[in-house]
Image (cartoon, rainbow, N blue to C red):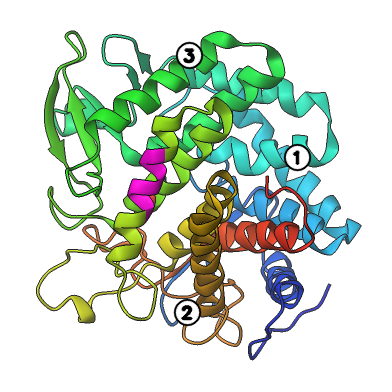
Amino acid sequence: MVFAFAQGCSSSVQEQISYCALQASVTLSGIPSEGMMPHSVDSGSDQWQYVVPGRWTSGFWPGELWYLYEGTGDVCWKEEALKATAQMLPVAYETPHSHDVGFMMTPSLGNAYRLTGNDSYLEAMESAADSLSTLYNPNVGTFLSWPGMVQKMDWPHNTIIDNMLNLELLFQVAACCDRPDLYDIAFRHAETTMDHQFREDGSTCHVVVYDPVTGEELAKHTHQGWKDGSMWARGQAWAVYGFTMAYRFTRDERFLQTAVRAAETYLNRLPADGIPFWDFDAGEQLEDQPKDASAAAIVASALLELQGYLPASESKKYRSEAEKTLRILSAAPYRAGGQCSAFLLHSTGHMPNGNEVDASLSYADYYYLEALIRLKRLQKGNAVI
Ligand code: GLY
């Protein structure tokens, strides 16, 4: 392993993957004990904050290690990925505290299963999918995202746009384990979200609250955005990614059109430098607001998948937008090399709470690396997924 910060900016996709590997080798050498997962680096710091398995971001570090193995071919990354993924396995057998099961399982166990074919990962993923399904409410047709907010906020059945990402676990287990029941509830969740979470202009609201008995929509709110009617950048990114992924598994044209609508709304409102502020509507002095590079990385990765489902003209546009975003993220001021061992700077986790503002975040790094891997596959003429 190399113990140095990468500096400067290089141009090819493989060079960017090598940069990620160099940065990650520094991160790896600083992990204080087994099972601590790098989560964030505060603005101006070079010190990682860690989370334990079971926190929503805990699967991203193992996921990065799997992508580094795939992107470099170096088996030392596989060894590290196996060790980090082993720490996530018990989570698959726990009672879920929230919808975040898929966020934790897909990057870690999902990539582990994809790259090793080891059935024990799939067994664990099926257990996790079954746990997640206990949060499904058939009266509403969505999963309860935050059980803790039922009492705290008086949101009796709440569903957040982020929840779309958890469907990947369900769809994948449904396909690999012959579980049409899991496919059906994931499909229904996507349908209900499509009908309730979008506004006329193609933007998404963060939280929809439903009556758990009648299924009626009670209110639309935000939790991490600026206000109830604003477009929280990462929420919109989850919508682009989530509906693109839902189309991958279902081939339902409505989901494809919903992904395109979410992407168009996001792209049309981007500021000049191509990276969104943390919320597209955050106040009059928008140019003074912190950025969210994580949203940009998520959308870049999603667009590289989305372009593969569209006719040539649209496909070209989305691929070009994704490449442009990756070029921007791979240079100053977004490249973290020389400042800390994350891949990227300038993401925002939870602005209203003042947490992780203008920080480095493990999920920004994960989706940035995923996008690089997807672009590399495309450049080689391989399938993106
Ligand atoms: N899913 C939590 C977030 O995007 O911050």
Q: Identify the secondary structure beneath mark 2.
A: loop
Residue 128 in the image: above or below residue 22: above
Residue 288 in the image: above or below residue 157: below
Q: Which residues are magenta?
A: 257-263
> Which badge, 3 or 2, is on the more N-terminal residue?
2
Q: Which residue is mark 1?
A: 112
The amino acid sitting under disc 1 is Ala
Label 3 vs label 2: CA separation? 45 Å
Residue 253 in the image: above or below residue 236: above
- Percent of width and height locating residue 126: 64, 19
Give the dominant element type of the magenta stretch: helix, strand or loop. Answer: helix
Q: Is residue 385 visible?
A: yes
Q: Is residue 98 visible?
A: no
- Percent of width and height locating residue 310: 53, 47
Do tag 2 and tag 1 residues touch (Cβ < 8 Å)?
no
The amino acid sitting under disc 2 is Ser
- Percent of width and height locating residue 263: 38, 53
Q: Quadrant of residue 18?
A: bottom right
Label 2 vs label 1: CA separation? 31 Å
Mark 2 vs mark 1, foreground winner is: 1
Q: Identify the secondary structure beneath mark 1.
A: helix
Tell me, for residue 196, which label it has, or none: none
Please report the residue visible at 68 percent of the width from the left and 36 percent of the height from the top: 109
Tell me, for residue 45, which label it has, or none: 2
Mark 3 vs mark 2, foreground winner is: 3
Query: Dot 3, how many residues are within 10 Å of its Cα: few (below 14), some (14-19), or many (20+)?
Result: few
In the visual, does 174 lie left or right of 184? right
Q: Quadrant of residue 323?
A: bottom right
Q: State which quarter of the image contains the N terminus.
A: bottom right
Q: Which residue is mark 3?
A: 184
